[in-house]
Image: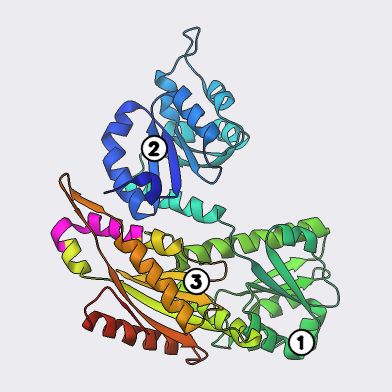
Amino acid sequence: MADTESLYKRKVYLLAQTFFIKDNRDELLLCAHKYDFDIQFFDQMAEFVHTAVQADPEDLFVVDLDVLYNMQLDNNRTMFLGDLLKRLPEQHHYVYLQTEKQSGRFLLQKMLVDNNCLAYAEKPIANDVLVDKLFNLFAQRKRDETSQVLYLGDQVRFDTRLLAQQQVEIIHHPDVQTLHLLVKQTQPDVVVIEDSHYLRTEVIARVLKKNIEVDPSMEIIMLQARPDPTLARRAIESGFDELMLVKDTDVLTWQLLNRIGKIRVNKNLISKDRATGLLNKIGFKKRAQDVIRRAGREEVPLALAVIDIDKFKTINDTWGHYFGDIVIKRLSLVVGSHMLEHDLLSRFGGEEFVMLLWNCLPAAAQERVNKMRLAFGEIAFEVSQQETRHFSFSGGLAAYPDFKTENELFLHADAQLYEAKQGGRNRICG
C-alpha cells in the first residue's frame, strides 16, 4: 500500500543511536510522509556513509551527535567529532542534532559550520517540529523557478551574469512614468530604484504598492549612490522596504541574491501543498494568472481541468485517513508524470486537483486527461494482505480563450466536473 520508494521523491537519511530510532521512528515517518518525504534510519556509521555517497545531493543528511558516545575506531579509541566529520562524504552538507551542553560550546558550533554544516538544532526537539524544520530546509534549497527584478535607473549596477546563473532575470527600465504598468504586467519579485529617479518622483513606491493587482510580497529597494540619512528616512516612510548603498558589484549582487533567496523560501512555503509538493490554491491562482497573461500575448490556447477522486469519503471512512493520503499521493504522481514543461498542477484541497495545460486545444485536453484517468485506474491499492482495490476520478474541462480569466475557467470546469459526477463518475466532461 505504501511503497515509499516510489511515493516520496525526497529523502532524509538519519544517523542516530539505536534507542533514538526505536523511540521515534514511527512518529517521524508519519510526520515526514505528511510533508512529502521519507526517512531512512541508520545506527551504523559505515552503512550511513555508503548510502550517502550514492544518494541524491538534493536529499537531506541528518546526524545525531550522540552517536559519538557509542562508536569506536579500529584501535578501540572512542570516535571524536573530528573523526566523525572526516568520515562524512564531502559532497554533502549535514544537519546536526546536538544536546544543550553541546550547543553551548561555541568552538563546537564553529567546527560544524566549518565542515559542511547545512543547519543544526538542539535536542530535545519534538518530532513534528523537527520534520517541519527539515521541510523548510528542502524549501530553501529548491531553485526551480526564475525570479524577476525590475531595475529603474540609468545603468544596471548588478552582475547580470551572476544573477542569471542563480535564475534571476533583471529587466532594465529607465522610465519612472511607466514603471507601474510594467510592474503590473510582469509581477516581479523585486523592484530596484536608483535614488536619482526616486527624487524625480518620490511617490513612486506608494503608486506601486497601492495597486491591488500587484503581488503583496514584492519588495521595493532604493539604491543610494552615497549615504544620506535624510533621504533614507524619506524613502522608508514613502514605502521602500530596503536601502542598498552602491558599492562593489559582487557585494551588491550577493546582497540582492540574499534578499531574493528569502523571498523564494517564503513564496515556496506559502504556495506549496506540503503533502504532495504541488502548488496549493494560492500558488496556483498566482501562477495561473501569469500563464493566462502570457497566453494572451502569444495567442496560445489553454485548457483548465478540475479532477476529483470518486467516493473519497468512503475511502477515508473504510480504510482510514492515512490510506486516503496514500491515494492522494499516488494520484499526484500519476497526474504529475503527464505534465509538460509549461503546464501547472495544483492540489486545491482535499481530493481535488486542478491543472492548466499550455498550448492545448479542447480535444487534446480531453485526450490527455483521459489518459491520466485510465493510468490512475490501473493502480492496484493493497487494502489488506488478501485484497486490492482500484479507484477512479472524475473531471471537468474549460478552454481559454472561450473563458478569459482563471476564475471563469475554474467555475466552468467545476460545473463540468459536477456533470461527470452526476453522469456516473469515472469520466471527463467538457
What kind of element bears circle 3? strand
Q: Characterize the local packing of mark 2: few (<14), some (14-19) or many (20 or more) Cα atoms within 10 angstroms.
A: some
Location of residue 70 with respect to 228 vertically, above or below: above
- Residue displayed at 50% across by 51% down: 137
What kind of element bears circle 2? strand
Q: CA distance from mark 2 to mark 3?
A: 31 Å
Name the side, left or right, on which 346 lies relative to 252.
Answer: left
| Lower sequence index among marks 2 and 3 | 2
Judge whether residue 229 can be spotted in this image.
Answer: no
Amino acid at the residue labelled 2 = Gln
Amino acid at the residue labelled 3 = Leu
Q: Quadrant of the C terminus?
A: bottom left
* Residue that carries the numbered disc 3 in the rendered image: 344
Where in the figure is residue 398, as x and y percent of width and height?
43, 85
Amino acid at the residue labelled 1 = Val
* Residue that carries the numbered disc 1 in the rendered image: 176
Between 139 and 194, the one nearer to me in the picture: 139
Where in the figure is residue 414, as x and y percent of width and height?
34, 83
Location of residue 173 with respect to 77 vertically, above or below: below
Name the side, left or right, on which 260 lies relative to 289.
Answer: right
- The magenta segment: 317-330
- Residue displayed at 47% across by 22% down: 46
The reply to whether the magenta stretch includes residue 347 is: no
| Lower sequence index among marks 3 and 1 | 1
What kind of element bears circle 1? helix
Q: CA distance from mark 3 to mark 1?
A: 34 Å
Where in the figure is residue 80, as x and y percent of width and height?
51, 20
- Residue displayed at 49% across by 38% down: 61
Name the side, left or right, on which 60 lies relative to 421.
Answer: right
Question: Secondary structure of the magenta portion, mostly?
Answer: helix
